Image (cartoon, rainbow, N blue to C red):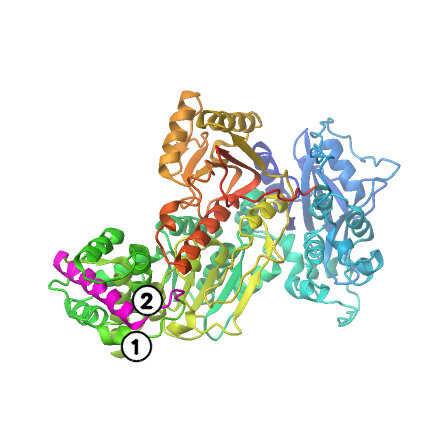
Amino acid sequence: MPGIVFAKTKDKLDNSVKSLVMNFLEKLQEDDTAPGLHIERLKNVADARVRTGRVNDMWRAVLFRLETGTTPTYVYYGTWSHDKAIDIASRSTLQMNPVFGIPEIIEKTKPESQPTVEQPAAPVVEAPAEQEPPASDPASPPAWVNGLVEHGYTLEFLIDSAGLDAQIAGKALEASTAPAFHRVTDKAPDWQGLLILDLSSGKSLEESKEDLGLVDQRETPEDSKTGTSEDEKIIAGFDKEAAKLQFAFIGDAPDALREVIEGGSADAWRTFLHPEQRRYADGSWNGPFRLTGGAGTGKTVVILHRAKTLAQRDPSARIVLTTFTRTLAGSLSQSLLKLDSELILAKSAGEQGIYTSGIDALVLQVFNAATPAERKEALKEVLGDAHASVTLRPSGDTQKAWKEALENADHGLDLELANPTFLDQEYVSVVLSNSITTRDAYVKVARVGRGTALTRPKRLGVWKIIEAYRQAQRVDESISFPELSAVAARVLKQRGANGVPSLADHILIDEAQDLHAAHWLFLRELASPGKDDLFIAEDSHQRIYGQKVPLSRFGIAIVGRSRRLSLNYRTTAQNLAYAVRLLKGADIEDLEGESQDSKGYHSARSGPNPAEAATKSLAEELDEVEKHIRQWQAQEVPGNMIGIIARTKYQLQKLQTGLAERMVEVRDVDYPGDDGSAPLYMTMHRAKGMEFFKVILFGVNEATVPLSLTTQGLAESERMDGLLRERSLLYVAATRARDELVVSWNGTPSTLLPRAYPKIA
């Protein structure tokens, strides 16, 4: 039975063709000599191994046949219309890279003499011509600079030292626009395209080689085996890290074959991982590990593959996969099943398998499972006195509770401190995280990470408000979610002291920047310290909920165990440049207080520049939204891949009503309907973790972004932090767009929008 190696296709297959290709390859696996397959040689070709196969009368597959023992192995390169397949087959070679010894498929320039098929050819069906992107505005100064030229790379260096194909390297150096540059990297073998992107972004060759797992075979030559054929060397080369970016060995497993064909390009993450991503997914560390990176760099992909790796490494392991919101947790659970439907998904923490949950739901599970005695002791340790009842109900309206506490306490504080936002952050970051239960302890405690200094009299005033807050909670027999996290952490700590095993062997945390101090207290107690205990994925640029808290305060030491991803797979270079400018001037710090800039972030994709729609009225802005939606629908963009994002629910109500008047159907993202034909609308907070082909940011005006409630009446440090959250929120919304981004407003635009951002030609 022939083996099959699947090469990640550069051209997306229509759904109607996928089933035909699947049928063709299944038959090829069974018997490559079957007459109906028409596996044929070509004349006048660059590589004698190349073959074409009949998918149907209109479509042909391009293959490379490798002689490996008694049965051959076929490398499936792709399926195209008849003439295009013949043309591509004639120009393509499967070879070993002379520098790094990696199998690669290179399409050479078109030969003068056209090949002919030894068998009668199928009817000719032309593929649609590729459309050139619109030319940049000639009046605008050229802002795009070829990074390879800027960093002084020569053609000789790119060929001899970087191992690039001469034709690809030459075209990359010659590119004068971003679309032209990305056409080169898109067409190149995956590792070559990524190496070019890395070098152009400022990475050194040595850094990129390490990330891609490239080893110069001229420096460490392998022992040559007598009689080893070139085909056998290519087969062995498929196991190299960089080769796995483009090739997946399917063997005789039809389920694996169906997975890579039906998954589509958007789901390539299931099969083809960047070597750097694979390293973090499969690695092992003697303690907590942190992975940082901007939006779209694949942190969640690594988390999912790591969950699978840990489960396969130890089937009895108890793995917890958690994140800030239950919506994101649900998405992670669905993605796990897409990745591997055979994975064991646990129903609760402490069970064998992978348990996926929002962090607060996880906390509540532990609290509800605690005995009355455990709760009473934990409540006393955290809050100073056990509640009259140990059967408490979580309260989500903490702002209201703090306002009432302010009214009931004689505190004497200025308004910038007598503020529910400041008080809640102080309570969670300082009081709960340090288990403060008395006034004297609060006066003495170090307030690490808090920007606003407090004198002793001010601390005494704050404590009076905290006492009033806690008293009201006792009367109501309620507890806030941060308090619940601290109490659940104490329950787990008590159990550990009594020799009770922890509930998890491994904890994977996505969107870690959105967690607060009490969450980290809880997570540290959920798994015992040890090998591969915590894996933390964080992007400080997207911090829209959590607080800046040093992890070392909670016994989570990541010194020497922290890495950063910089290549964006989702957002085009143009959209990424726009989104990054939204953060310009902001002082962004990670969980350890280290500065995090966006330098070095780069994209693997190119597209149109973001469009800005400035209108005078709401009606005009709605007209703009309608125009873009109808244009995209005419282009047959799936409705559920069009996202309309606004800052507030009130804006979305106006949007829905206005578009209904214009006979444009849109749906709430939480109620999308069955057929997925309608564009989806959501708030910026709700958009977290989602992606769309086309995105409209609606109502980005000065009255709404930044939202005044997030910064009003706060001390300077907290006000700046609130403003940073608004910038991050806008950044999150802008990076939801894969291909096209439109930013609209009526009246005066938001002060957070970039001014005269550079177009990428």
Instruction: Where is residue 251? Give x, y as percent.
Output: 60, 53
Label 1's element? helix
Alpha carbon of mark 2 to alpha carbon of mark 1: how far?
24 Å
Residue for badge 2: 522
- Which residue is depicted at the point 47% across and 38% down? 700
**Of residues 400 and 170, the one drawn nearer to the viewer in this rendering:** 400
Span shown in magenta: 450-476
Residue 21, above or below 325: above
Q: Is residue 469 magenta?
A: yes
Label tally: 2
Disc 2 residue type (three-letter): Phe
- Which residue is depicted at the point 47% across and 68% down? 592
Label 2's element? helix
Q: Quadrant of residue 493?
A: bottom left
- Which residue is depicted at the point 48% across and 50% down? 727
- Which residue is depicted at the point 79% across and 58% down? 153
Residue 356, above or below 451: above
Disc sitting over residue 444 in the figure: 1
Q: Is residue 49 magenta?
A: no
Query: Comparing marks 2 and 1, which lies closer to the viewer?
Result: 1
Disc 1 residue type (three-letter): Lys
Instruction: Where is residue 309? Give x, y as percent.
Output: 49, 62
Q: Quadrant of the C terminus?
A: top right
Name the N-terminal-most of marks 2 and 1.
1
Q: Look at the numbered discs 2 and 1 and tell me whether their residues touch, using CB distance below 8 Å.
A: no
Residue 314, above or below 3: below
Instruction: Where is residue 487? Give x, y as percent.
Output: 25, 66
Q: Is residue 734 among what the camera can see?
A: yes
Q: Main secondary structure of the magenta part?
A: helix
